[in-house]
Amino acid sequence: MAADSSNHYDVIVIGIGGMGSATAYQLASRGQKVLGLEQFDIPHTMGSSHGLTRIIRLAYFEDPSYVPLLRRAYELWHALEKTVGQTLLHTTGSLDIGTENSPIFKGARQSAALHGLRHDILDSKSLRVRYPAYQLPDNMLALYQPDGGFLTPEQCIVSYVIAAQSQGADIRAREPVLDWEPTTNGVTVHTTRGTYTADKIVLTAGAWIGKLLPFLKPAAIPERQVLIWMQPKDPAQFAPERFPVFVMSADTGDFYGFPIHGVPGFKLGRYHHLNETVDPDQLDRNLVTAEDEQILRAFAEQYFPSGTGPTQALKVCMFTNTADEHFILDTHPDHAQVVIGSPCSGHGFKFCSVIGEILADLAHNGQTRHNIALHRLDRLKLDSHS
């Protein structure tokens, strides 16, 4: 322990975005002395935990093993809502759309069947009748699941931070970490404002994880992403009660979208927008090109023609991707006191509540009751000494 015991903590959490804020709360609520360090503001728009709305969906096409994690995530989001007295999760229903054998539609149907999820299969005509904004070709199908919707990420982060602080957590923004090192009894962290020690550390730094853990650089790849909000020609069709969130396999890529909320337009993006690898410290978050906009508008014109009025906003953010697009939730292979939570490959925010629980479990107990087999480090076959 450091000579100044006021600078010693049970756990230090680095990165107070979606996962870090939830982890700090979970640890503080277990009686741990917690320090949370964030290099930017809380909340901020520099990483991946922003954008006003984030999809939450239960019929998970990526892998059926996500569904139990999602059920727990829903429970924890609703618990947080009760704690802070705010609505954070807005239920609109969700649509997984594609041809019958597309990965999105086929995977969603598999998850729904395996876990007994309520759902309807809609052809393009039935979907148009129910939700007129959706104008799909005859060869596409949609799986509707009524529990889907969206989270408000900035509110979620602020809510978790306030809840963590109410449990005694020390949360500090605008305090970049300069370096950290494992010690015999824990870890030491050096920041622009001071030096701290702790028994454990949780690294939830998003796109910066490879800078804190260089051996992860080949596996955790930051990628530029662009989102558009367009004013619908008929806004009523894109209101939350008439426009379920969606993910879709289209001819020009996989896309996702949201009803009107927070900006006077409906929001959509393309997964892995232009496949642009970036350095998070060099990314120009204000540069959006005509090509960026046209890719997104062309998709909307094909499938949502009543939604393609004037552009209301264009925003840049980041995915941080693993090759298999599953998460990294594990302890460091050489240092059991170091817990890693990253990256989330563009589909992780909905899980932040349960990931916070998992990372707190790993830091507090060294294990978790949740099934995280997909997300273990050893699958990536990395050299932690590199």
Image (cartoon, grey):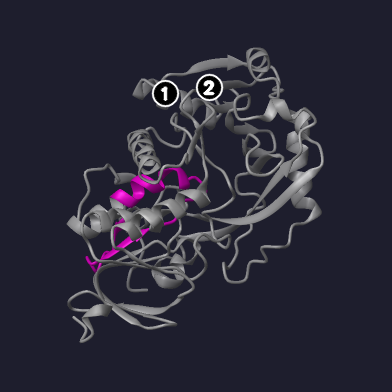
What residue does disc 2 label? Answer: 143
Pointer 1: what residue? 112
Q: Amino acid at mark 1?
A: Ala
User: Where's the C terminus, which quadrant?
Assistant: bottom left
Numbered disc 2: secondary structure: strand
Residue beneath the point at 71% across and 41% down? 264
- For residue 161, above or below residue 122: below
| Nearest to the observer: residue 213 or residue 92 | 92
Residue 337, quarter of picture: bottom left
Q: As shown in the figure, which amino acid type bears the numbered disc 2?
A: Leu
Residue sitting nearer the eye, 374 or 303: 303
For marks 2 and 1 on the same chain, the one whose residue lies earlier in the sequence? 1
Q: Residue at x 42, y 19 (%)?
A: 118
Image spot of residue 225 (x, y percent): 63, 53
- Residue 80 x/y as whole percent: 37, 44
Q: Is residue 65 left or right of residue 245?
A: left
The residues colored magenta run 330-357
CA–CA distance in space, label 2 to label 1: 9 Å
Q: Cβ–Cβ below 8 Å for labels 2 and 1? A: yes
Quick check: 371 above or below 126? below
- Above-or-below relation of 221 to 125: below
Q: State the image coordinates of residue 345 (x, y, percent, origin top left).
A: 49, 50
Residue neighbourhood size for the residue with mark 2, other residues' Cα within 10 Å, grouped as few (<14), some (14–19), many (≥20): many
